[in-house]
Image (cartoon, rainbow, N blue to C red):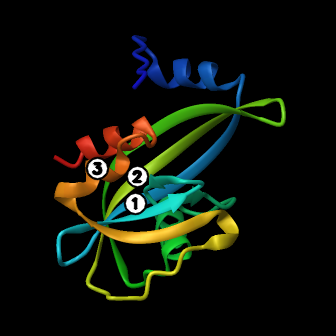
Amino acid sequence: MASLLACSPKPDEAMKRLTQSFNHIEAAGGVVCNTNNEILLIKRFGRWDLPKGKVEPKEPIPDAALREVTEETGVKNISLGEKITTTYHTYSMHGKQMLKSTHWFKMYTQANDALIPQTEEGIEQVKWVKQSDIYVYLTGSYSSLLSVLSELG
């Protein structure tokens, strides 16, 4: 996993300067736990992931996180917990440099809804996974997910 550490007396200004050379996408999602102490995962493009998606214009970030988790997984009646962290990653799309910031929240549900993958978004499978098995599923996935889970404590 690559990390970036920047020391600045004005970190907000430094971040703004750094991000000006990218097209910025804001996303939000969650680490959803159920009453069996399992975590909700999605499989997209052959990799296990946590549910997340783009924030709509003028949409509050916590609302976007709940909406995206429900859309991608079919799980409703989710309670929003505290914010975990924000991750950043860059990629190239159609010749443009992109920066995605993803705001992660703890989420909880007692619902036993049918898991419905949002296939139009490339989601192949949705699954509840025991917390003790989570790293087996995320081995070979996105390194930023490991930093999100490490913040759970």
Say which element carries label 1: strand
Q: Amino acid at mark 3?
A: Val
Foreground residue among 70 and 43: 43
Q: Relative to 19, say whether 68 is above or below.
A: below
Q: Residue furthest right?
A: 94
What residue sits 67% from the left and 38% below the top?
A: 24
Q: Horizontal and vertical percent for residue 52? A: 51, 58
Give the residue number, with chain letter if any, for mark 3: 136
Horizontal side of 98 relative to 100 (left or right) equals right
For label 3, the crowd category at 10 Å Cα-Cα, with few meaning under 14, some 14 to 19 and many 20 or more, is few
**Toward which corner of the image does residue 37 lie, by quadrant?**
bottom left
Foreground residue among 9 and 78: 78
Residue at mark 1 to residue at mark 3: CA–CA distance: 19 Å
Say which element carries label 3: helix
Q: Relative to 135, say whether 30 is above or below.
A: below
Q: Amino acid at mark 1?
A: Gly
Q: Horizontal and vertical percent for residue 77? A: 38, 84
Mark 3 or mark 2, whichever is nearer to me: 3
First in sequence: mark 3 vs mark 2: 2
Give the residue number, with chain letter if any, for mark 2: 104
First in sequence: mark 1 vs mark 2: 1
The answer to whether mark 1 and mark 2 are in CB contact below 8 A is yes
Q: Amino acid at mark 2?
A: Trp
Any mark on residue 30, and which? 1
Horizontal side of 57 relative to 125 (left or right) equals right
What residue sits 36% from the left and 48% below the top?
A: 138
